[in-house]
Image: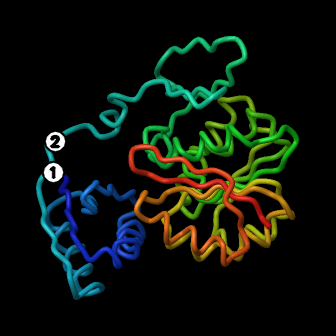
């Protein structure tokens, strides 16, 4: 089987919607390059052509697509190449296939993301982890929206959270996250549920901290839900957005009743720490 990459160039205003569409139709993450090009993948040229045709029908204006075959690689292990130990203040994040001796006082997480998003190699995850490490107080209750591999919920528990719950719409991600929680010795304080955060989050509140590492369009839609789910004065971390999107989202935060506390940029990915007013 020869996989194909599909490069999609669009109007900036359509980019978030197209990325969401691609994820929902392929079940895989979308790569977004610095120039704004979205890269999706299909198992072969036939499926790539079919996906492109449907995409063009869904977004008929301002769309440029190109297909290219990928080298025959065992992607089940190739993604591990170049992944090493990462540090975020007191936190360290190490892949399960590397030996890492934690230093005194270091809070170590051992992770195997498998097919789920969240290895710590993406700027949006790193930015969210950095902000979470700075503000989490032991004994707090944490909600992780779009939990993927479970790294943020697990980090919260390792930092002392009383309870951390991840909500993930991808049914295949939660078993991976659960295995990671057990591997890190926090399976009794971390749980993962499948479903739509807009419906489930209010049922799990009030909580002290919400982390939402999702696309800006989704973060924007979830603002009222997150505000209701947080206790008064609670913190919300929003990530998964590019640095140029910051001014737009900052205005939306103010209108939704959030006060900006801190910001972080990592490899052009922007995250913001807020407090519920």
Q: Which residue is mark 1?
A: 2
Residue at image coords 54%, 56%: 239
* Identity of the residue drawn at 75% across and 34% down: 159
Counting from the top left corner in percent of width and height, residue 197 is at: 66, 68
Q: Left or right: where does residue 23 sit relative to residue 261?
A: left
Q: Kindly identify which numbered label has been placed on residue 238.
A: none
- Please tell me whether residue 162 is drawn above or below residue 255 in the rendered image: above
Instruction: Work out whether residue 1 or residue 81 is closer to the camera in this orientation and state it.
Output: 81
Labelled disc at residue 72: 2
* Circle 1: element type: loop
Residue at coordinates 85% horizontally, 42% vertically from top-left? 162
Q: Is 157 left, or right, of 253 in this rendering?
A: right
Residue 116 visible: no
Residue 276 position, x and y percent, is: 77, 64
Instruction: Specify whether 59 is left or right of 27.
Output: left
Say few, some or many: other residues with alpha carbon within 10 Å of mark 1 (under 14 / 14 to 19 / 20 or more).
Answer: few
Asked if the residue at tag 2 contacts the one at tag 1, i.e. Cβ–Cβ closer than 8 Å, the answer is: yes
The answer to whether residue 135 is visible is yes
Image position, residue 247 (x, y; %): 49, 67
Q: Quadrant of residue 43?
A: bottom left
């Amino acid at each position: 089987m020869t996989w194909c990459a599909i490069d999609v160039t669009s109007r900036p205003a359509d980019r978030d919607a197209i990325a969401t569409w691609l994820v929902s139709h392929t079940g895989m993450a979308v790569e977004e390059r610095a120039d704004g090009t979205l890269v999706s993948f299909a198992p072969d040229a036939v499926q790539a052509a079919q996906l492109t045709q449907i995409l063009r029908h869904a977004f008929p204006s301002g769309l440029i697509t190109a297909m290219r075959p990928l080298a025959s690689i065992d992607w089940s292990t190739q993604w591990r190449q170049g992944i090493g130990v990462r540090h975020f203040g007191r936190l360290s994040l190490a892949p399960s296939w590397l030996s890492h001796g934690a230093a005194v006082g270091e809070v170590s997480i051992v992770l195997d993301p498998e097919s789920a998003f969240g290895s710590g190699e993406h700027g949006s995850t790193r930015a969210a982890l950095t902000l979470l490490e700075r503000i989490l107080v032991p004994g707090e209750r944490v909600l992780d929206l779009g939990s993927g591999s479970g790294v943020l919920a697990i980090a919260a528990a390792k930092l002392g959270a009383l309870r951390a719950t991840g909500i993930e719409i991808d049914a295949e991600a939660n078993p991976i996250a659960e295995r990671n929680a057990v591997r890190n010795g926090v399976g009794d304080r971390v749980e993962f549920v499948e479903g739509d955060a807009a419906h489930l989050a209010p049922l799990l509140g009030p909580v002290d901290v919400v982390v939402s590492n999702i696309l800006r369009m989704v973060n924007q839609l979830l603002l009222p839900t997150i505000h209701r789910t947080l206790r008064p004065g609670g913190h919300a971390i929003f990530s998964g957005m590019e640095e140029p999107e910051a001014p737009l989202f900052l205005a939306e935060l103010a209108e939704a009743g959030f006060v900006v506390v801190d910001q972080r940029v990592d490899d052009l990915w922007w995250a913001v720490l807020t407090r519920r007013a």
